[in-house]
Image (cartoon, rainbow, N blue to C red):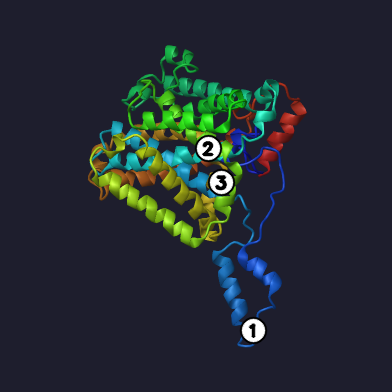
Amino acid sequence: MSWSRHSTLTTPSIACVAGRTGRAHSRARTPNASARGAARMPSVRTDSGGNGMEHTRRASLWLRDDVGRRDWMDVVKGVAIIMIVAYHVSLFLNSLGMDAAGVGRARIVLDLFPMPAFFLISGLFQTRIQSWSFADLWRRRLRQYLYLYVVWSLLRFVFYLVVPNVRADGAGTAASDPLALLGILVWPISSYWFIYALFVFTLVLWASRVLPAWVLVAAALIASTLMSAGLIDTENVGWNRMIEYFVFFVLGATFQRRIHAAVERTTPLVIVGSIVAFAGFAAFATFVPRVAGIPGVAFIGQVLVVAAGFTLATRLARVRPLGWLSYIGVRSLNVYLVHIFVIALLAIGLSHIAGWLDTLPGRGLLVIGAMTAIVTALSIVITRYLTRVSWLFVYPFGRSAGARTARANARESR
């Protein structure tokens, strides 16, 4: 995950997921078209009572003129983490028996965009690692990933020793199993598989640096198409998803410059075209039976929705009332780490009134929306205080106490 001034972590690669580099740095700003035009054109005349000035003020209420070239990533991450929270909310609600209003169908939609988007963005920040030694790779990437994965897996285990688990699926039943905890490096079962995937992906990318780029891209693509079509199965959700999504990490690392250029130079016509293309694909996949079982179909859908999401985000980042998406996106890793605990606690309360909730208009979908908003907000508030305990988020060894204190103070001042 790469990071900005808002990030909690300091390891650059983990920052890619939440958003930017852990070291404070100034971001290069690229003026938008209107600002560039203003530099070349004479000032607007306001002879008719200042209408030009009034128009400018109205525009500034809706559009930002200080958007950086990479701010679209925060919007993407904000949307993606909200969809992940909604997906996990739907899993818990399904365990409560709330599937009457299409909760199951909602999960299909919510599972299509977030992980490909996150892994592609993460890959964009991995281009330098191929020149590093393994010692550098371990210090600057791997140990942070592994540390986070182990620490938060331990916290999850302790949490479910105390809190009743309403989940009825495999992940729920294994949450408080000591043997499952001991096997997390070979059999990832929790939602934290994503962090472990960053560890595995980064290591594989570095180890394969001597191979031609097309070899790794081709291998990852073949594995992804076979996995998404159900033709191969490890019988472990974590490994299955790693195999399916590794291709996006590789594509991000391999075509970093081209992806940045394509997204940042997008036009309204491209945005509309990408949205229409995905809508057409979604309609086709919905009405053609068993099309998802064809190798490559899922990958095409993921590419189309990522293209639509990335290009649209370049415009949404300029819309001032949607600034909350960027706010959440900058804190996406914080939300990711904590939201499961919040959902689990809320689900306990909902388990007593699940029957009544089914009588509400919209039923399951209404509850998904409300819970997603509540869980996201609470996760941000909780981590605002949790980040004061720096070892929960940052590898605590091998750095001076003074440096750790300085980083903690910097976080508290945000």
Q: How far separated are the C-alphas under marks 1 and 3? A: 42 Å
Q: Amino acid at mark 1?
A: Thr
Q: Nearer the viewer, residue 188 or 345?
A: 188
Q: Position of residue 370 (x, y in %)?
A: 38, 46
Provide the residue designation for mark 1: 46
Residues packed near mark 2 inside 10 Å, few (<14), some (14 to 19) or many (20 plus) = many
Q: Position of residue 12 (x, y in %)?
A: 65, 35
Snapshot quadrant of residue 123? top right
Residue located 50% across and 17% down the image: 185
What is the number of the mark on residue 251? 2
Q: Nearer the viewer, residue 187 or 214?
A: 214
Provide the residue designation for mark 3: 259
Q: How far separated are the C-alphas under marks 3 and 2? A: 9 Å
Q: Residue furthest bottom?
A: 48
Q: Specify which label sits upstream in the sequence, 2 or 1.
A: 1
Q: Specify which label sits upstream in the sequence, 3 or 2.
A: 2
